[in-house]
Structures are given as structure tokens and as C-alpha cells.
Amino acid sequence: MNIFAAVKYTVVLPECKSMRIRNLLIHYVLTGDVSPVGKDAPSDVRVTASALRTIRDAARAGSEDDCATRVDVRDCGAAFRFLMALLAAAPGKWLLTGTPRLLQRPIEELVAALREMGAQIRKEPDGWLIVGRKLHADTLTVDCTRTGQYASALLLTAPLTGLQCLHLLPAEVPSASYIQMTRQMMSWTVDVPELPFQRMPLGGLADWSSALFVYAWAMLHPGACARMPGLTLRSIQGDSIIDEWFRAIGVRSWEDDQGVEIVAEPVGAPLRRVFPVADHPDVVPVMAALACLLPAEFRFEGVRNLAHKESDRVGALATQLAPFADITRQADTLSVKGKPRSQWPPVPYELMTLGDHRLAMAFLLFGRDVQLDDVACMEKSWGTLWRKLSEQGLITV
């Protein structure tokens, strides 16, 4: 029961695309078929399902010609890495491709690990040419310095390769929470000595990365209550840590059998916090925008790999938010100190999303104070949520 007398909004979050994409891969590896995906699902999920259907249909047709089957994952980084591992072990000839930005994103360390298992993979101008064949390795080491998705790709395809033990470099691997999510979702076991593991309840599919936006919105509207059906505070999603972070800065939350409700108290003294984000890179854009708007001073530690996302997010935030904050950027840290509104430029001010869904989501917090060049890119992770929030009056697009 809500103990606060407040205006209440209901926000139906999209499904967690990270979990859903892993589900698609697991189902395909075990059955050779593709789970159905709704039309309102995040576009990354739909792209992955479409690519898997292409692979399934080509495998069933058993083409004997020399033409490679084109598997286009557009700008989905998870599909890029996961399907690289799948195709390397799938008989046939494949061209794995996507947008120009995607083909610039890191994958070389995964290719090296797959080649160690016997994979035939060659870089082409428009993608990666893969001649799928039977692979095998009992034990393997992969360098995850630039992304933990390499490890998830190898774990998800372990039933096809016989992999039993996967060693990770470096010892403190970035995005370890996502690797652990993969392990929780698998019905098989692969030993990862660098990451202690214990089975946990999976929790719901409601997306914690999207819930972050609602937590930030609540801080900007003290007293307004937001209910998020299907969200659970105990979740294998690493970004569920935001509930702990926001409790420390004035957002109260409680859970019942329907979901989670939150309400924020007014911000008092100047707010200064340090957030370790190496395992939670997706939170940085929204939290940086929130620092501008409160204003507050937030320091993010562990941001190095944000340069490898849909955009160079650290560089983009440093440039786009400079009119609203004093920003200090170092090798692995980003500090954002919001300026008083009196020092802002005339509004509405135009912000560029660079086609990056996380930047667009973050910049929506500014409301009518900014104009965005692209909001449709949010369908990558939000599906149609942004349209529904606009209809409820929670955001302006």
C-alpha cells in the first residue's frame, strides 16, 4: 500500500533486451528454432530474432552453392558478438554484417578465441566472412578488456563446442554482471574461475536500464509516485543496483506482488556522489543528465569502455552536456558538476543524440528545455515506451 499522498503514474517498462536476446540464443542453441518476438519489443530483440531466422532457414535449406548467407545485425552489438560465435560453429558459409559503426566496434579478441578453437573467420570490407564448422575446446581464455560480451558469446554457444572452462582476462573483467546474467540464464554449466557463481532466482524481464529513467524522473518531480509493474528489486540484472544508489540520494521504493513503486523526496544539501560503473555502463548517460538538472556533482569511475558503444558516449556526453555542467574527463573517469540554471544557454537548446538510444533517453529528462535531433533511435532498447510516456505527459518529444 502506498503510504505517500502523491500523483501516481504507471510506467509499463519494456522487457530487458539483454535477457531477451540471451533467451533467443539459448533457445536456438538447444532447439534450432527461434522464439516468437512481439512487434513492440525493443528493436535489438527484433533484429536478433530476424538474424536467427535467417540462419535457421539457411541451415534447413542446406545450400550447396558458394554464396555466403548474409546475416545483418544492423547496430546490435550483442547480436554481433553472440552470432559470431554461433555462426563459427554452424555449418555453412556466412557473412556477418551490420552498420558502419557496428563494424568498427570491438570483436577481434572474440575472433582470436574462436580461431583457437578452429574457426575459419576472415575480415571483409562489408563484414566478417565465416565458414562454419565443428569447433571444440575443453578450456579457453578470452580477453574481455574491451567488452564482457565476448565471454557471454562463448558461454552461450558452449553446447556446440564442448567448452567446459572459460578463463577471463583481465582478473577484474568489465561488465562482469552481464557475464553472470548469462550464466544464470543457461541450463548448462561452464566453469569461469575468475567469477564465483551461485544460482539465483531470475526475477522478471522488466528492464532495469529503462527503470533508471523513471528513478531519475522521480527525483526531478518530488512527491510524484511512479509504479512499474513487473519490476522486481531482486533481479539478476546488474542495473538493479540503481535502487540502492537512489535510496542513498532520496528515492524511496517498495515492492508488492504487482511490481515496484517509487517516490522521491526533495533534494536538500548539495548532492555529491561517486558511482562505480564498470559493471553498469548503461547508467552513465541518464545519471550525467540528472547531475545537470538537479544540479548535483556525480563522478563516474570505470567509463573507459563507453567509447565502444553505439557512439563514443563519454566524448558525446562531455560535448553535449558542456553548456549545462562543468565536465572533467580522464582515462577512466567522468565527473559532471551541474551548473545553476542561471548559467544555462538560452532554451530550447538543441542536443544531438548521434543515433544513440542511451543518449536520447538521457536527454529526454531535460523536457522542453532541449530539442533532440532523433528520438526514434530509442526503440533499440525502449520499444514503444517513449511514445507511451509522451502520451501520459511524463516526457516531451
Image (cartoon, grey):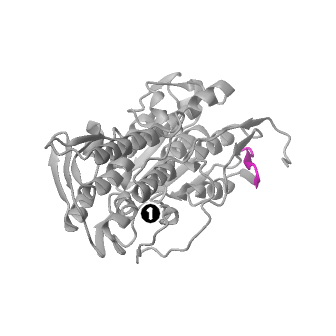
Picture quadrant of residue 47: top left
Residue 264, magenta (yes or no): yes
Question: Which quadrant is the C terminus positioned in?
Answer: top right
For mark 1, does the 10 Å Cα neighbourhood hold few (<14), some (14 to 19), or many (20 or more) residues? Answer: many
In this rendering, is residue 216 above or below 395?
A: below
Q: Which residue carries the number 1 mark?
A: 179
Q: Give the structural element (helix, strand or loop) at label 1.
A: helix
How would you classify the magenta stretch by its main secondary structure? Answer: strand
Q: Which residue is located at x 68 percent, y 48 percent?
A: 230
Residue 257: percent from left, percent from top? 77, 53
In this rendering, is residue 189 above or below 152?
A: below
Picture quadrant of residue 117: bottom left
Residue 101, magenta (yes or no): no
Q: Is residue 227 visible?
A: yes
In this rendering, is residue 352 above or below 69?
A: above
291 vs 87, nearest the viewer? 87
Residue 31: percent from left, percent from top? 43, 56
Q: Which residue is located at x 39 percent, y 53 percent?
A: 32
In this rendering, is residue 336 above or below 133?
A: above
Q: Which residue is located at x 42 percent, y 43 percent?
A: 49
Q: Which residues are magenta?
A: 255-266
Picture quadrant of residue 132: bottom left
